[in-house]
Image (cartoon, rainbow, N blue to C red):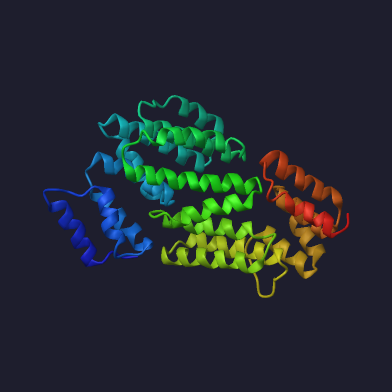
Amino acid sequence: MEITNTMQGIILEHFESEKQLQLTQFLTMVSLDNNEATELEITKEFLLQSNSDLDKRLALEYFFINHSYPELKYFIQLNSESSNALNKEMAKLYQLMLDLRNGKPVHEVRTYAQSVATFHPELTCLKYFLFIAIDLNVCNYDRIGYFLNKVQKKLHQIENPLLITFFNIRKQLLLFIYYWKRNELILARKHAYEALQMPHHVKQKAQLHLDLALSYIYEDFESSLYHIEEAKYIASSLQDQQTLNKIADYTYPFICANFGKVDGVTTNDPIETAHLEIVKGNTRLAKEILEELPVSTPFTKYYLGLATKKQHFFIHSYQHFMEKRSDHFFARLPLRATEGLGI
């Protein structure tokens, strides 16, 4: 996506003026005449040119909630070299969030997190968010509420309204996950829809629509399909091929197979290939595919149960979802299957 000459002129004019706008004001101005996808590209350019310590800190959260990881990495490095102590400490916390996403062992991230100073409410909130991310990494959803209560108590101490908005976006998304995994779907969707109405995190909205699509797998195909199409529209507008591939290979075939609508549906993922073959009645082929996989998951156990109609696969799938993932929502899959098969 290219930035127009007009917008480049606006950015240049802003930086050449005596009184420069802060990011909060710039986002307000840009959002008036641009959609969220264009806003993201323009704001990237603005932040890359800004010399403000505050903007450099805000850039960390802005790119984090937009899943813009190359830009996040750049601003982590930039802030870590700052003479401002707050910028340096924030860079450490975002680096740990990035390390966690990139597969660094959870116990190492937790240990390093303890050493980060929290002399400012912004840092305290970020450390709580990091602890939540650590718990999510090991599928421990039960403590999300505990840490979010701590975040809420600190938010009123933060002075910057834009950072409060960014943190509230995180909070709504985490509350969605918390209630979704507890199978409290009315509350989960309430927080999801509130997050969708909030500005400045367009890239994350695509993932949220995919999660909402999955939240309807026990209800109706059309609602799931609506959210898939919304996610596809956002990802296409951002030229986000990674999300488009995720839709094509995972979310869409999973949902189609779940509702028995598999005509013309394909995938490059072997697990979902097996799922599609089960629905088509090719259970022997599906079983062969699943048994050749190097890693067993609660989903592969569930699919093996569907392919073989053997109860122990459903039991193991259910136990895996509940005991290792605390996932009450997807644990309904093997329960539903046993009821449907009369096992």
Can the viewer see residue 317? yes
The front one of 326 and 47 is 326
User: Please, is residue 253 above or below residue 105 in the view?
Assistant: below
Q: Is residue 122 above or below residue 327?
A: above
Report x, y in % for residue 131. Answer: 51, 34
Quadrant of residue 98 within the rendered picture: top left
* Image-based side of 125 in relation to 38, left or right: right
Residue 127 is left or right of residue 221, and the answer is: left
Q: Position of residue 254 (x, y in %)?
A: 66, 62
> Quadrant of the rendered structure where residue 268 is?
bottom right
Determine if residue 104 is in view.
Answer: no
- How many numbered marks, from 0 up? 0
Q: Residue at x 76, y 46 (%)?
A: 318
User: Measuring 59% from the left and 50% from the top, which residue is drawn there?
Assistant: 187
Provide residue 211's location: percent of width, then percent of height: 57, 56
Q: As drawn, which residue projects farthest toward the right?
A: 343
Determine the residue positioned at 24% across, 47% down.
Answer: 22
Residue lying furthest left? 18
148 displayed left or right of 291? left
Q: Is residue 86 above or below residue 49?
A: above
- Location of the C terminus by quadrant is bottom right
Query: Which residue lies at the image location 76% right of the left edge and 51% below the top edge?
Result: 301
Quarter where residue 120 is shown: top left
Residue 263 picture location, percent across and down: 69, 75
Q: Quadrant of the N terminus?
A: bottom left
